[in-house]
Image: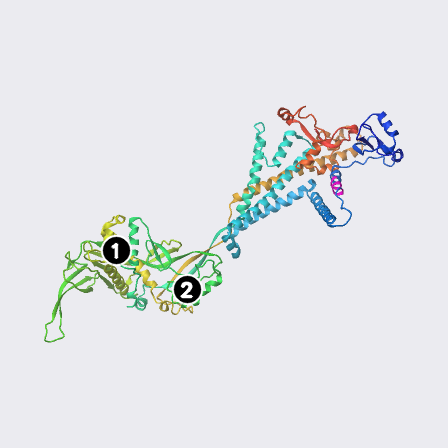
Amino acid sequence: MELGFALQGSSCKPSSSTSELSQRRATTYRPLCSASEVAESTLEPQESLSTPVIVLETNPTAMDPGPRHHMIRRSFEEFLSSEKELELAASRPPVGRGKKKDKENQSWYARKVLLSLSSGLSNLTAPEKHPSIIVIGQLFLLTLAWSFYLVLLLKESIPLPFYLAIRIRNDPTTFTLVLTLISTAISALSSLMLSLSIRYAANYYLLRRSLKVYTLGSTIKMLNNSVIFDPLHPSWTFITLGVMIAVGTQTAGWSALMTPVPIITETPVKGLEVEITDNPSNAMYFTESELNVKFNRPETGSLPSLMFSGFNGLTVQSGQPTMTNLNGWNFLNTTAGVLPPVLPILIRDPISPDQVKILNTSSQNSSTWSIPIFSLTSKHPLPQGFATNLVIHDHQGFTADVSCSGSGIQVDIPPLNYTNQIITIPNPDPYLMSSFMQAYEFSRICGNTTHRSNVFYVLDNSPDIDNSPDMCIGLACPIESEKIGPTANNIIIYMPNALHAISCNISTQVTVVEVDYNNTATPKVLSVRQNAWSNNLSDFIITELERLFWYSQRTESNDIFDLFSQSDLFAIGPVSSLEAFIKGFIEYTISNLRGSLPPEQAIWGFANHIQPPAQVHQIAGTYYTSTIGFGRRSLIALLPITVVGVASLCILSFILFKKRRDNRVHNLQNLDLLKPLSEEPHLQLTPDTSITPKGLDGESYKPERGVEIFDVGDPFHLLAVASAGGIAGTFGDKFSEIGIKMGHAIRVKLGRVDEEGGTGRVGLVHA
């Protein structure tokens, strides 16, 4: 093997003595200067050689027919490996001791370890191992994504552990950051495998076929996530744009797939409340003490809570909704006669399933347990989560149909009339005369019966004149029933001296109400029961109406009717306004009454889960708990993930198929060449070399092993093969845009640059 050398200076000098040259039988020198200069330089003494020898090139054309008759040529892989060895050898650990030397030794060993790791990683990610990496990686990611989607599709939701849900709710920013980083890392792996498949395809065409210069450059741009805007090649514009969008949206797809969402869990519950339509129950609960319920009445001049509830009912007609607060729950316009369940255990945030056991223990014995639900149980354990809502589907509520007229009251004219009577009041002193008082008996006929309901009032003037006294009169008709005893479904009230005398007919009805206990509960009447209230409950309503009007009456005015007549909000006739007012007032009154029941009466016998008596109404509902977890996902989240994965596998499968076809053709040709000549020449197979892809040096399918590690995505590999000079002049004599475009159509491949004997270095050559 010949070594060419040059000296730093004006003359050419060998780097060894004559005796040394004679010992190297297989080595001759090809000088870069003239023969005379070489001769002169060899005659000079060796001591005059003061400059080092620089080896420029190797030419194996001249060989000594000795033991080294065959030429050993370093491959591309061996060249890269030797470069790393030289780099490592250049920084040998220094000899000696001391702090400085120790630090240098540690640095050298650290570099050695890193270099070893990088070498192992390079071997693992070598181009020949790319197919295995692509198949395993993309199939794993696709299986992971689609399995997660199908599991959510079948199970609907997977809640996270509750402690983790609390952390996510309290610190969503950090969680979003971590999730985005994980999604970005997974997307980067998928994008890497897509680029490996593209590089594998480009390597195949450069090694075994050829590529246009424009295709090679566009592929490199695509690997760098660049978009090509070229009107002459619109296909590459769409390809690079699609690749960039698919790769870029993978992070969004993985984030959408893995981001937890609020999950609402529905748990059926059932409970008990007071059955106020039962007459024995009413006799027990609505005693005289309950008829004197003390309502919240602020200082003089303010509307009490009962009066305000009436105005809330009136806002239904005016289209201006207002809120009524009862037991911590907000009701829109009216309470519908229900009492909201105050469940301090259930509405805690957060709640664990074990905490609900308190409902059947200490809470039932608490003096503050004045709620309609005395037992709340579920066949299923309440899930851990944040309490969201409670819906009772069959609350026992009520409503009232109110019909008022301004006709006032007439003598002996039904439905409500009065008679004037003189009542004699005897004097306890027999020697003194008895006194006389004028009384008015108000009465009504109840239905088709002869039963009359009367009440006596002592008045100064007749109730049908303008200056009649301030009063509120109401009469309810009891109706006998074999099932529930005496009840009353109709009340007539009379209110004189309120703008003008008004009489109202009130018909109450028990209802079944569905209440959604959310931030704003809107009762919805589902059905109406056709039985009536008990007599004593009707008396309670009349009493509260009378108390309300007495409370609102002033010396020269009435708070209720003054608001009706003065506010533009209630631009409705006083009669129709009063109907809505009374309806809302009555519904709130009964809700308030239910909340005032003594807890020891309401829950007796239920603490030990005894069969509820007839005066207890069973209700059912749904308890909603929210937490954080994984819910059903849309297929659009899987679109970029699937596109990138399938594209990688398709590109790889196509190249592997072509490689297998090439190998099969090559094997068939080799078999044909080994067959003996046939006696019939027209039957002998002749290999078709036109379809045989050629490797380096024209050898089919046998590129040297070093070239197999070539990676078109590695810029250093590209610089190495482009600097060989095999495509010199492809883009013209000088650098210009026109010359570059003219070279786009030229096809190139990896080959050996032609030199002496055709054994030049590997580089890009013309196809």
- Report the side of 387 relative to 241 (left or right): left
Q: Position of residue 642 (x, y in %)?
A: 57, 42
The residue nearer to you, when weighing 689 against 412, is 412
- Mark pair 2, 1: CA separation: 35 Å
Give residue 669's quadrant in the image. top right
Q: Circle 1: is it few (<14), some (14-19), or many (20+) Cα within 10 Å?
A: many
* Amino acid type indicated by mark 1: Val
Label drawn at residue 402: 1
User: Is 335 above or below relative to 713?
Assistant: below
Local SS, label 2? loop
Magenta stretch, residue numbers: 83-89
Residue drawn at (25%, 61%) of the image: 547
Q: Position of residue 413 (x, y in %)?
A: 16, 58
Label drawn at residue 675: none
Label drawn at residue 375: 2
Mark 2 or 1 closer to N-term?
2
Q: Position of residue 318 (x, y in %)?
A: 29, 49
Q: Quadrant of the C terminus?
A: top right
- Report the side of 203 relative to 759 (left or right): left
- Residue farthest along the bottom direction in this orientation: 430
* Residue 536 is one of the magenta-drawn residues: no
Give residue 32's quadrant in the image. top right
User: Is 68 above or below relative to 531?
Assistant: above
